[in-house]
Image: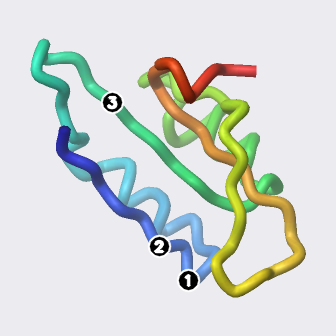
Amino acid sequence: MNVGKHDETYNSSDIDKTTSDSPAPTTDNGGIRIMVCTGERMKSLIEDKLYKAAGVKCTSLEVRHSQGLSNEFQCYSSFENDIIKHI
């Protein structure tokens, strides 16, 4: 599986817009799989604007920052599997 990486170093809508306009990785069956891990305050931007057409939703996957930042993180995806479930 191909995985796209989005490092949200800068909290900028321009960066997210550029990322959402980029070609998404595809699965073997031709379906599109998108995963975005970012701060929970980005929920409305992710679900209602940038990735709405792709069906990206908040998941139950627990995301933690490697440097121990205290703000809440969420994982959003356009798919579910044994580990990733939409909530």
Residue type at tag 3: Arg
Q: Which sits earlier in the primary sequence, circle 2 or circle 3?
A: 2
- Does 35 sit left or right of 27 as displayed? right
**Is 21 located above or below residue 81 in the figure?**
below
Q: What element carries label 1?
A: loop
* Mark 1 lies on residue: 9
Q: Give the total number of marks visible in the rendering.
A: 3
Horizontal and vertical percent position of residue 68:
78, 82
Q: Which residue is drawn at 27% across and 49% down?
A: 3
Compared with 70, 77 (above or below) is: above
Label 3 crowd (10 A; few <14 / some 14-19 / many >=20): many
Task: Give how far apart the Cα atoms at labels 2 and 1 are.
Answer: 6 Å
Residue 28 % position (x, y): 11, 21
**CA separation, marks 3 and 1?**
23 Å
Q: Do the residues labelled 3 and 1 touch (CB within 8 Å)?
A: no
Q: Mark 3 points at which residue?
A: 33
Of helix, strand and loop, which one carries label 2? loop
Q: Which amino acid does label 2 sit on?
A: Asp
Q: Residue 7 carries which label?
A: 2
